Amino acid sequence: MPQTLLKAYRDNAQTPIEEALCLPFDVYHDETIHQLEIQQIFQNDWVFACAADKLKSPGDYFAFDLAGEQVVLLRSKSNDLLALSNICRHRGTPLLDLGFGQLQKNIVCPYHAWTYADNGELLGVPFEGNCKLAKEQHSLPHFQLHEWRGLLFVNLSSQAQSFAHKVAKIDPFLEKFELERFQHSYQTTTEHWQSNWKLAVENAIESYHLFKVHKETLEKVTPTKSAYYVAGDAHSSLSGGEMKGAQSTLSKWFSGSNDEAYNQYLLVFLPPSFIAIISYEGFDWIHILPQGNQQCSVTPGGLSKSPAKNFKSAEFQFSDAFMLEDKVLCERLQRGMLSTKSQGGKLVDMEKIIVDFHQYLGHKLFDTSVSDYCETQKAAIFLK
Ligand code: FES
Ligand SMILES: [Fe+2]
C-alpha cells in the first residue's frame, strides 16, 4: 500500500478551490488506488446504466460491465424492472451478452445451461445427478435500481445512500427545461480511451479547455469565455454557459418565451461518472467507466424529442469530431501522468467543478470533509 501516495491523494482531494492543486499524477495509474476506487466508489454509489426508455417491453434487457461487475437490467414478464447479477451461480459464466437485447423466455447459461427465471430464480440444472443442490440458494443476486428523469442508475451496495439525496440540490435547476419533452433515447457506440477514468471525467466537466482543444468545434457554439459555475458541492455540480443559436427562432416563437435559460446550456455532473448537457433543444450525456487503471469506456447517449436519430447527421458528425479531440487529448495527458520527475500545479477558478469532483473522491475514499454547497449568481437564470 503506497502510504505516501494515499496521504497525498487525501490531502489534495479535500482542498477548497483557493488552494486546490491537481491530484498527484500517480493516482491516475497506480493499481492499488484503482482497486480502492472500484471498491469505495463504483461498488458503493449510484452509477448510471441506460435510459429507461430502452427497457419498456417485457424481456428487454441491458447487460453491462460496471467496473468489472457484470450487471443486467431487465424488464420481467410481470413488468418489473430489475437489476440482477449477470453471472451464473454455477461456475461464474456471464449469462446474457453485453448490450441491449430481448430475452425470449428464461436466462440460460451458455456453459452448462443452468436456467434462471427472469426474476433471477434458479429453475433448472441439467444432469443434476445425485448431488442435490438447493435451488433457492442459487438465485441471481439483485441490486438496487433507481429511475430519475428517464435515466436508470444502479447501486451494487446493499447499504446504499438514497438516490434522492444525490440529486436533491440540482433537481430544481432542471424544471425550466421540461425534460419530459424528451421521450426517445439514443445511445451510440461505446469507445475505449487509453486514459484513466478520472482524466476523462475531469476533461468532460470543465469548460476551460474548449477554446484550445475544440477551437473549430465546441468553442464556436459554447465559448470558454461565457462559461460559468452555477451551483454544487461534492455530491453533484452544475455549470453552464452561453449556447450560440441554442433555440431556433421558430421554437422561440412557438414556446412564446425568450427565457434567458433557453440560450444557455446546463452541464449536470453526477459523480462518479455521469455528465449531461441540457439545453432547450436536447438532453445529451456521456458516461465514463473505468476499464483497468489506464483505460476507460466512454458511452454517449441522450434523450430527444423525436424517435429516430440520424447518426449520419451533421449533429453527430459534430459530436464525433469533438469527442475525438477529447480522446486524443486525454490519451496524451495519460502519458504525462507517468512522469516521476514532474508534478501538477494549481487549479484555476474555471476548474471549480473539478474541485467538487476531487472532494467527492476524497469523501468516498477517505471520508474527508467537503466544502459547503455553493450557488453563484448565475443560478438565478435556471431557477423558476
Ligand atoms: S457456469 Fe453456468 S451452467 Fe455452468
Ligand atoms: Fe472537451
Image (cartoon, rainbow, N blue to C red):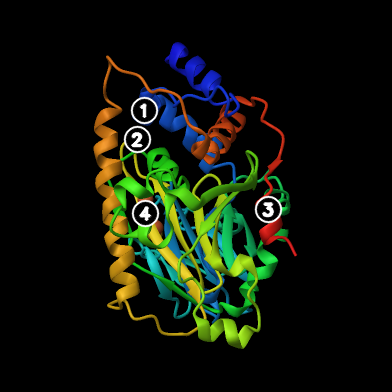
User: Can you tell which mark lies on residue 31?
Assistant: 1
> Where, by quadrant of the figure, is residue 342 drawn?
top left
* Whole-number angstrom distance, CA of label 1 to CA of label 3: 39 Å
User: Can you tell which mark lies on residue 293?
Assistant: 2
Circle nearer the viewer, 1 or 4: 4
Q: Amino acid at mark 4?
A: Val
Kind of element beneath mark 4: strand
Image quarter in which the C terminus is found: bottom right
Mark sitting earlier along the chain (1/3)? 1
* Whole-number angstrom distance, CA of label 3 to CA of label 2: 36 Å
Kind of element beneath mark 1: helix
Query: What residue is shown with label 4?
Result: 298
The quadrant of the rendered image in which ligand 1 is seen is: bottom left
Q: Amino acid at mark 3?
A: Ala
Q: Residue at x 58, y 37 (%)?
A: 356
Q: Residues within 10 Å of mark 4 (few under 14, many from 20)?
A: many
Query: What residue is shown with label 3?
Result: 379
* Whole-number angstrom distance, CA of label 4 to CA of label 3: 29 Å
